[in-house]
Amino acid sequence: MSQALDVAAIKKDFPVLDQVQNGRRLVFLDSAASSQRPVQVIDAMSDFYNTTYANVHRGVYRLAEESTNRYEHARRNVARFIGATNPNEVVFTKNATEAINLVAHSWGRANLRSGDAIVLSILDHHANIVPWQMVAAETGAEIRWIPATADGQLDLSDLDRLLDGAKVLAVTAMSNVTGAITPTDTLVAAAKAAGAVTVLDACQYVPHLPTDVVALGADFVCFSGHKMLGPSGIGVLWAPMELLEAMPPFLGGGGMILNVTVDGFTPDAPPARFEAGTPPITEAIGLSAAIDYLDELGMEAIRAHEVSLTAYAMRKLSAELGDSLRIHGPSEPAQRGGVLSIELEGVHAHDVSQVLDEHAVCVRPGHHCAKPLMKFFGVAATARASFYIYNDESDADALADALVAARDFFAL
Amino acid sequence: MSSLEDLYREIILDHYRNPRNKGELEAPPAHRTEGFNPLCGDEIVLYLSVDGDVVADIKVGGQGCSISQSSASMMSAAVKGKTLDEVQALVLQFKGMMSIHESEIGGDGSETEEGLSGQDGDGSVAAELPLGDLEALRGVVKFPVRIKCATLGWNTLTQAIDEMAESA
């Protein structure tokens, strides 16, 4: 399992990477926004459409039954992949944002009252902030913030006071800006001690590190398929069955009811209760194929590859660019994921990214949907390069070369 | 690098490095308006002082990329001392320069420098007022994502003028 990744072989599975732009090999460094997907995933979805597709949980004909079987197999595969013991604790959503909204609106509305506290972190993505601000405005709950340290980690020095009287701790497992891996053990234990539920945004975590939701101990874990080689249009909410069973529906419609009369409705049990309407069926098949691909490589090996590549890239960039470069986040690669938020002195992130595009290097400029964190850092935008299984040292070298070109182009 | 140099003309970099009318005005009496590009976080803070019908003074603050900041700098230089009618005309003309060419680029993504120089001939709108330095921003239309950067200051100016008209 833990063999080093054969990146040259992996790259061959990703046709989209095999292209030339401006006479240069395409270097894709934006997997933190959305990863690419291998032919195995594309083929699985294509085969499903060509041979099997029908709506799930409806028809009695063979295609419908097989379609349902495949969809439920995907659910079991996701559950196994994240260490969940009961597949019905896996709820398919449109994306991680919808998964968090589901928790905020269903659990939040049912459990939060005026004066209750919601604890959020300044490191978090807007997806784990705005739903809580919406529910806070509706319920009168108060929002408290876990601050960050200068190197982009959570500042937990005041955690117990922040959690005192809190009902929810909603926090990222790994920052999409600084790459900081948060101390989920400490966070979950402190939340439990305070009587709060923990909602983990694991979008940047599940694709890159071995995940065991039972060991994590969080009450809700949310992630998306498109950041882990799967298609867009599917996300996952995991929560223990007793929590899900106690929650009211979020979206209403077909597929989530036991019975409907002119007087009202009776919701179905989880996970159906939270999957109103036709679900992302083919997307679930694709996500399952993505999980098989990741399993084949081994999550331990993937993590080791990314730590080593991140360490190499940080050394390389700092050697080539010296003091004109700032990389936000922990300096120790073992404490972070393969996400490098870069500031080039005197050059705005948009302009950096434009020059990088000229060099066929794809990075993401902007605030990365984390404006509170950007404000904390005192920057409007960074250029973010992020690594995945198909990246290697040659990609980090291309990034360094392009950054040198950007610095020289805008040299004052 | 030729297409990069189309985008980043020397005059643009000059306005970026040495922004004109940078700063603040006391508000009130000046009118203060903030403009945001929600996609990238760029922001413009505009201070507008109108005397009768004339833009008596304008100051620009905020932070952003070379395109948004230089465009705002050029805009401030272009509208200072102009009547509001002249400013409106200039806004329309600048936005026309952006969107007219945006649609042309949409028809053929392989526009080259040749295509760009060819566009000078179709400047029926551009014939109305001299755009001066602003002409340098023509190259932005080849980079559709950056058009929002170039128009940020102008949209903020429009917003400021509308707000002033409403409160008048």
Image: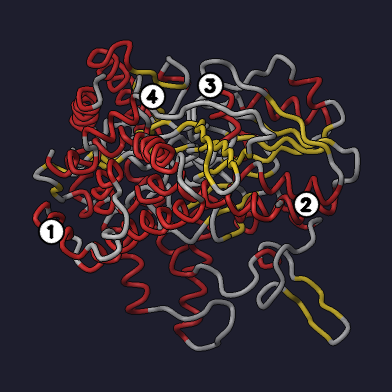
> Mark 4 and 3 residues: CB-CB less than 8 Å, in contact?
no
Compare residues A142 and A406 and report the one nearer the observer. A406
Q: Residue A396 is drawn in which quadrant?
A: top left
Specify which label sits upstream in the sequence, 2 or 3: 2
Q: Secondary structure at mark 2?
A: helix
Query: Mark 3 highlights which residue?
Result: A152
Nearest to the eye among marks 4 and 3: give it: 4
Residue type at mark 1 is Gly
- Real-space CA distance between mark 4 and mark 2, rounded to the nearest whole angstrom: 39 Å
Residue A121 visible in the snapshot:
yes
Q: Is residue B81 above or below residue A377?
A: below
**Where does the image place residue A377, in percent across and percent down from the top left?**
53, 22
> Mark 1 and 3 residues: CB-CB less than 8 Å, in contact?
no
- Real-space CA distance between mark 4 and mark 1, rounded to the nearest whole angstrom: 34 Å
For disc 2, the neighbor class at 10 Å (few under 14, some 14 to 19, many from 20) is some
For disc 4, the neighbor class at 10 Å (few under 14, some 14 to 19, many from 20) is many
Query: Mark 1 highlights which residue?
Result: B115
Residue type at mark 4 is Glu
Residue lying farthest to the right in this orientation: A114
Q: Residue A279 is drawn in which quadrant?
A: bottom right
Specify which label sits upstream in the sequence, 4 or 2: 2
Q: Secondary structure at mark 1?
A: helix
Residue at 55% across, 86% down: A59
- Real-space CA distance between mark 4 and mark 3, rounded to the nearest whole angstrom: 14 Å
Query: Mark 2 highlights which residue?
Result: A107
Query: Mark 4 highlights which residue?
Result: A343
Q: Chain of mark 1?
A: B
Residue type at mark 2 is Trp
Circle on res. A356: none
Left or right of A18? Residue B14 is: right
Nearest to the eye among marks 4 and 2: give it: 4
